[in-house]
Image (tube, grey):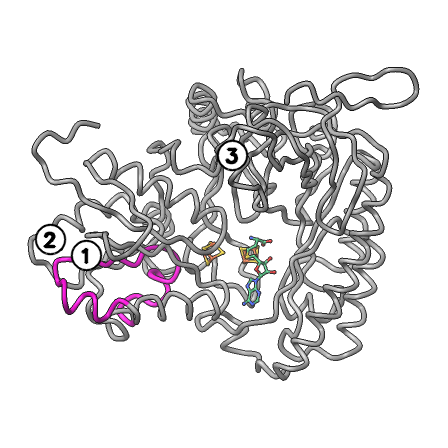
């Protein structure tokens, strides 16, 4: 964008939290770029510093408060630098942020991000401590609360994406599940499905920009539901059918799933639509019925296992399932923790994200249940469950040895040798299978964005290691790697 004589503003933005936040940051940057902002990767050069924050665990908040603390002196020396706090912690802590860091210029909740450019302008003109927040869950009529959390998804900035051919598409805002430990329903507001025609249009725009893979986002994405004015309901399975028709889109993933809404209809759709990923991230949270009840998750271990059976019956070994667990939830006993270990062993997840319970003010658990599991016990359980899961992941990956998998090449791996990049030589690349397994291999950087076949010769708990396969001759796979 040409900025003629207008001064170019330099924006530093730091994002923590889930994919929702990554997408929100993409949109804020798109909005600001359109007004002549350029990105910088350090706070020193920036005249505008934004933090997109997360409140899901205490640790995520601590990180931001210390980053703000480090800016105190910079702001004293350069009062013209604008500092903004956006996202879930802005919505949750509100004025508390100004108390802890009075030099912050703006706080903006996730439902108000369209206001960021104007608030920055006003701050430059001298306005202090402005805030734009959505209504709390009890602060008005349901439709008013809903509206105050609506986001502004059409603004996109392809250059902010991890790769040019992968993009997120938010299909659902908010959450109504109210698990007792979780802050998200308070920070993101009521659950709302976005209209299917808007989503199809957005997918078309993304495809036009070169996107091959879209990841549909929602806190309980498979509970997606939209009822139009005529009363017609579109559910997740229907939406997948609509998006599957969008030309140019080759892969469709969706996260995060809620166990109870993993219906046969949805699973059959996943089975029947070739573009749809068979990777199902369905957090169980615990393997104990008593703990699940205290968490108010709305299902039992038996319900979860019945879901696993539905997945097995429809998708067989094409499906990969992963989970989240919280260890050390209020009142959790050694026996209850053992039941979680048993569930992990029984379900043999592809991987699990394991978190130590972190009390969140404003949640039911914080109000009613004591956070009584000692930190060292949480740590021990965390390590033990992780070790059990990792052993399973490594064991299960063994079956890929000698197999060929289809991989969408995402880009250079973290370990890629930068000398090789500058010389244009082969490089360690990373990609993913349709069921979300990470694959690394040496290849030409031109392969990025293509779907290719990789023969696997080594595996670890998290990664398959292989080499591009270009021809199949006789019973053996011959790797010619002609792309080099
Ligand atoms: N909407 C998703 C996940 C949202 S948060 C879902 O319901 O599955 C991501 C993960 O963080 C959760 O699955 C849970 O395992 C964890 N989490 C949420 N609140 C937490 C808390 N207070 N302490 C520790 N972990 C938490
Ligand atoms: Fe939080 Fe539960 Fe909603 Fe997930 S389903 S966002 S864990 S309240
Ligand atoms: Fe964190 Fe908000 Fe996402 S609390 S996990 S950034 S929805």
The residue that mark 1 highlights is 82
Are the residues at dot 2 and dot 1 in contact (C-beta closer than 8 Å)?
yes
The residue that mark 2 highlights is 124
What's the distance in space between the residues labelled 2 and 3, CA to CA? Answer: 41 Å
The residue that mark 3 highlights is 421
Q: Earlier in the sequence, mark 2 or mark 3?
A: 2
Tell me what residue is drawn at x 21 percent, y 71 percent: 73
Tell me what residue is drawn at x 42 percent, y 53 percent: 188
Horizontal side of residue 419 vs 112, given as left or right: right
Local crowd size for mark 3, using a 10 Å CA cut-off: few (<14), some (14–19), many (≥20): some
Q: Earlier in the sequence, mark 2 or mark 1?
A: 1
Local crowd size for mark 1, using a 10 Å CA cut-off: few (<14), some (14–19), many (≥20): many
Reply yes or no: does residue 86 show up in magenta. Answer: yes
Tag 1 secondary structure: strand
Instruction: Please state which of residues 321 and 464 is positioned toward the viewer in this rendering.
Output: 464
Q: Which residues are magenta?
A: 71-96
Tell me what residue is drawn at x 76 percent, y 64 percent: 387
Is residue 395 shown above or below 287?
above
Tag 2 secondary structure: helix
Quadrant for residue 54, please give it. bottom left
Horizontal side of residue 459 vs 92, given as left or right: right
Is residue 475 shown above or below 104?
above
């Amino acid at each position: 964008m040409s900025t003629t004589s207008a001064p170019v503003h330099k924006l530093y933005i730091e994002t923590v939290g889930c994919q929702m936040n990554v997408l929100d940051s993409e949109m804020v940057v798109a909005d600001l770029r359109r007004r002549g902002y350029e990105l910088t990767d350090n706070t020193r050069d920036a005249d505008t510093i934004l933090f997109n924050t997360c409140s899901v665990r205490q640790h995520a908040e601590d990180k931001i408060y210390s980053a703000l603390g480090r800016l105190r002196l910079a702001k004293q020396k350069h009062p013209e630098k604008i500092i903004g706090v956006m996202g879930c912690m802005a919505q949750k802590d509100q004025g508390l942020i100004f108390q802890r860091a009075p030099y912050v210029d703006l706080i903006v909740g996730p439902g108000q991000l369209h206001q960021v450019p104007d608030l920055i302008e006003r701050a430059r003109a001298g306005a202090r401590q402005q805030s734009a927040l959505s209504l709390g869950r009890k602060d008005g009529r349901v439709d008013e609360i809903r509206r105050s959390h609506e986001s502004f998804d059409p603004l996109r900035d392809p250059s902010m994406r991890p790769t040019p051919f992968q993009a997120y598409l938010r299909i659902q805002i908010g959450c109504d599940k109210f698990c007792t430990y979780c802050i998200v329903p308070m920070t993101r507001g009521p659950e709302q499905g976005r209209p299917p025609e808007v989503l199809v249009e957005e997918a078309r725009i993304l495809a036009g920009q070169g996107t091959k893979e879209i990841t549909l986002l929602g806190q309980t994405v498979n509970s997606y539901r939209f009822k139009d004015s005529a009363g017609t309901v579109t559910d997740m399975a229907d939406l997948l059918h609509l998006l599957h028709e969008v030309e140019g889109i080759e892969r469709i993933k969706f996260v995060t799933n809620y166990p109870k809404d993993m219906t046969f209809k949805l699973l059959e759709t996943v089975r029947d639509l070739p573009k749809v990923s068979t990777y199902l991230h369905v957090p169980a949270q615990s393997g104990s019925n008593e703990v699940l009840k205290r968490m108010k998750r709305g299902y039992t271990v038996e319900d979860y296992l019945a879901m696993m059976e539905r997945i097995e019956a429809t998708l067989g070994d094409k499906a990969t399932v992963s989970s989240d667990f919280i260890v050390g939830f209020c009142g959790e006993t050694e026996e209850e923790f053992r039941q979680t270990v048993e569930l992990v062993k029984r379900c043999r997840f592809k991987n699990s994200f394991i978190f130590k319970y972190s009390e969140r003010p404003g949640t039911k658990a914080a109000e009613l249940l004591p956070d009584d599991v000692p930190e060292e016990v949480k740590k021990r359980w965390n390590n033990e469950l992780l070790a059990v899961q990792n052993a399973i992941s490594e064991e299960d990956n063994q079956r890929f040895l000698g197999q060929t998998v289809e991989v969408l090449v995402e880009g250079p791996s973290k370990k890629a040798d930068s000398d090789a990049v500058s010389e244009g030589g082969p490089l360690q690349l990373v990609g993913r299978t349709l069921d979300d397994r990470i694959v690394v291999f040496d290849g030409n950087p031109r392969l990025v964005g293509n779907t290719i076949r990789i023969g696997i010769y080594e595996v670890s708990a998290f990664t398959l290691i292989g080499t591009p396969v270009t021809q199949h001759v006789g019973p053996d796979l011959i790797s010619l790697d002609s792309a080099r």
